[in-house]
Each structure stands twice: as C-alpha cells, then as structure tokens.
Amino acid sequence: MAKTLTLLEELTKPRMRGLAGERPLPPVALAQRQFEAAADRMGLDPDVRRILAQPMNELVVHFPVRMDDGHVEMFTGYRVQHNNALGPFKGGLRFHPDLALGEVRTLAAWMTWKSAIARIPFGGAKGGIQLDPARCSRGELERITRRFCFALGSNIGPDYDIPAPDVNTNGQIMAWMLDTYLSTMPPQDRQRGMAVVTGKPVDSGGSLGREKATGQGVVFLIEQWAAEHGLDLSRSTFIVQGYGNVGSWAARLLARQGAKLIAVEDASGAIRDPKGIDADRLAEYVKQHRGVAGYGPAISHEAFFGTPADIFIPAAMAQQLTAATAPLLDVALVAEGANGPTDAEADGVLAKRGIHVIPDVLCNAGGVIVSYFEWLQNRQGDYWDLAEVDRKLHAKITAAYVRVRDTAVRESLDWRTAAYIVALSHLEAVYKERGIFP
Ligand code: NAD
C-alpha cells in the first residue's frame, strides 16, 4: 500500500504548464479508466482482463556516464514490456527529466492497443531515461544513449523488443542505439540486428517516410474524417500544440491541403496569427530557436486553447485537455497526435459539446505502422520508395479508422471506447485460441 501511494505521489507531481491550480490526474489512472470502461462495456473475458491489466516485464537500470567536466553522473532508465501476444514488444524511448515508471507503464500499454488496432504483428513496450537532453552536450547525449543501450543488453532485440523515437529522441539517438547494439553482436548476426530499432536515419537503414509517419497518419485520418463530415480542408483552419516531430509534420502536411495554421503552442510559449502561420518556415525557425516563441504575436496558454478553428492537433505531452482547458476549445475536431492528451473529464466535456475526437491509439498509429514497414524492409533487405510507404500507410491506418468508426456506430459508443474494444477483442481472440500455458 505504502509503495502505491509513493508512486501516485510521484505521478501527480504537476509536470506541465497549465492553468493556475490545475493538478492533472496521473496518466496511469487515465489509462486504467479507459481500459476498465472498454473491458466492462464489451464484457472482456475476466482471465484476459487480468493478464492485460498489468505489464509482463519491467526493467529499471541505473548506469554511470562520464560527463564533459570529468565527473561521473548516475542515470536511471526504464523499459516496460506490456504484452507480446501479437508479436515482439514495440515502443518508443522518451528522454524527459520527469519520466517515471508509472508513466512508462501507461505508455507501454497504449502501444499494445495501438498495434492491435492497426493489426500489425507487434506487442507494446515503452522506455526512456530520466534526463533533460537540453542540458547535455552532444557527446554526453551520445555516451548516455550508448550506455543505456548497453544496460538494456539482451532485453531488446529484433525478434524480441524493438525501440523507436519518442519525445526528445530522434533518428540520431536510434543510430547510436543501433551502433551500440551491433557492436555487442558477433559479426555474422549483424545484418539481422539492423532491425533492433526503428526510426533510424535513412542512411543507417531507416525507412523513407518514417520521420513524418506519425504526422502523416494524423493527416490521413483528418482527411478521411473531413470527407465524411463535409469539412472542406482547403478552407479550414487548425491549431497545434507541440511543434516537434509529430506536430510540425502534421502541420506541414495539413497546410499542403490548403488548411491554415493559425496558432501554435510548445514548451517555449504560444503564438497566434489569424492571417496564417507558414508551417514550413516555422519548422525551420524551431530548429534554430528551439521553440516557437518569437516567431509570431505571443498569446497566453488560455488564449491558445480558446482560438476558434476547425481542428485542434495536440502533439505535445499527456493531460493537456482537462476540465479546465476543454471548455475553452472552439473546434469541431480534436485529432490526438500526442499520447494521452485528453483526460477523462475533458472527454466528457468534449462529448457534451459535440466536439469529435480521433483518439490517440488510432490517430498517432502512423509511427508504429511505418516502424513495422522499416522492420520488414530491414529483414528483407529490400527498400521501398516513398510512394509505396505512403500508400501502404494510408491503407493500414484508414482500415484501422474504419474498424473503429464502424464499432462506434454499431455499439453507439464514443470513438475512444470503440478503439479500445477493437484492440481488446483482437487480443481476447488470440488468448482464447492459444490458451494459457501450461
Ligand atoms: P518531440 O520531442 O519531437 O516534440 C515534443 C513537443 O512538445 C515540442 O514541441 C515541445 O516543445 C512540446 N512540449 C513539451 N512540453 C510542453 C508544454 N508544457 N506545453 C506545450 N508544449 C510542450 O516529441 P514527438 O515525437 O513529436 O512526440 C509528441 C507526442 O506524440 C508525444 O505524446 C509522443 O508520445 C507522441 N507520439 C510520438 C510518435 C513519434 O513517432 N515520434 C508516435 C506516436 C505518438
């Protein structure tokens, strides 16, 4: 009991800039509520429910790294492997100063649902290091990444657990992970080892289209939703929270459909320009200035959420839409690029206000889908052109959309619960067919 309280205390530490007095629910409670609601609604088999309610493996590593000034610093890293009934564990690595085991557990479970909804043969995992990479030199970041990879040892592998980028990690981090992993393998196994991580730079065995994949998937689903709801994207407006990999790619690709970006918020602040913000130029600016602040007229956090637009793409951290911020929203659609951006209260507020939500486990699945394509290409030694990657991504993610939409319509459900039911039904069928050993 005492242990649980400590974990909850740790998780409820306010981590995000929010409205005064706001104390978000821990994501672990959010994920549990979403899972329980769907399991109750579909009558999930109680044995399968017990299995899926907790992760299979949890690894915490503490490892030393020599810093630039010569002293040795200790770092803490995590890898939680939630489930591998459908295939090898799969999920990103996040570098964040507040990263905690509970959050990693939640993110790992979300990966299991995501792979199941997209019908790709992967399970769910997540990991990362408690670290603020902005405070490290490039050399320190490389040594920390390599030492973490070494500490994970045989707990990752191309047939077992395959990491990818997430918040504050990118292709460069994956290239260091790959090189470290391959350096510990016998030379004759190295070709197979290429698939140990995805999201690699293209020159190092990555897939064309992987960098933009999550944002591309978000945009494919916005296009599908817009076509079904009579929204003309070429005359639409949108706002984005988070201008990293997911947010900046979603914004750039949606702008190519003629949609107008009018407000952006990231960790550096929020900007708004009703005449339109050039999404490509903003991406260049963010690379140089490490944030959107200064690119356009500044606005408050509250004004950002209250900006009237057709679409809101949350693409930053969890629990951004809460009972405090959801009532401010003035949009028709929330397309969840981030993991867990909407808490349970906000879900209720959005439903009451008739704001549609494409839930995270469906909406941001483009990343893991193209990670699967990268893994396949590495194993086959056959590389696809960008048009082929995009075509296959479009087919997979819109098929997942149709599964979720049809379940929601058939069962008169919100799309989040419907998405969970799509995932849980698939996993339930697999457990029933295979049984429980022994
Ligand atoms: P990133 O590190 O590239 O970008 C994160 C962005 O969030 C940055 O713009 C940062 O400034 C912003 N941010 C951080 N704290 C903020 C705050 N307090 N207020 C407003 N903005 C804040 O990360 P990413 O890879 O783009 O991931 C973003 C989200 O998408 C995460 O929830 C991640 O789990 C999810 N996601 C990422 C992928 C992927 O392929 N990278 C796939 C699926 C889901």
Image (cartoon, rainbow, N blue to C red):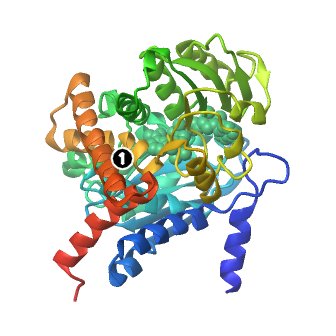
Q: Is residue 125 above or below residue 172?
A: below
When asked about the image quadrant of residue 123, the answer is: bottom left
Q: Amino acid at mark 1?
A: Val
Q: Position of residue 232 (x, y in %)?
A: 43, 20
- The quarter of the rendering in which ligand 1 is drawn is top right
At horizontal 39% and vertical 47% (from top left) the residue drawn is: 362
Residue at the location (39% across, 60% down)? 420
Residue 102 image point, x, y percent: 59, 66
* Helix, strand or loop status at disc 1: loop
What is the x, y in percent for residue 401? Answer: 32, 44
Left or right placement of residue 16 versus residue 51 in this view: right
Residue found at the far top of this picture:
275
| Residue 204, image x, y percentages | 33, 32
* Residue in the picture at 50% in, 42% down: 356
Residue under label 1: 197
Is 431 in front, or is 353? 353
Above or below residue 256? Residue 428 is: below
Quadrant housing the N terminus: bottom right
Other-residue count near label 1 (Cα within 10 Å), few / some / many at <14 / 14–19 / ≥20 = many
Report if residue 142 is visible in the image. no
Q: Is residue 263 above or below residue 103?
A: above
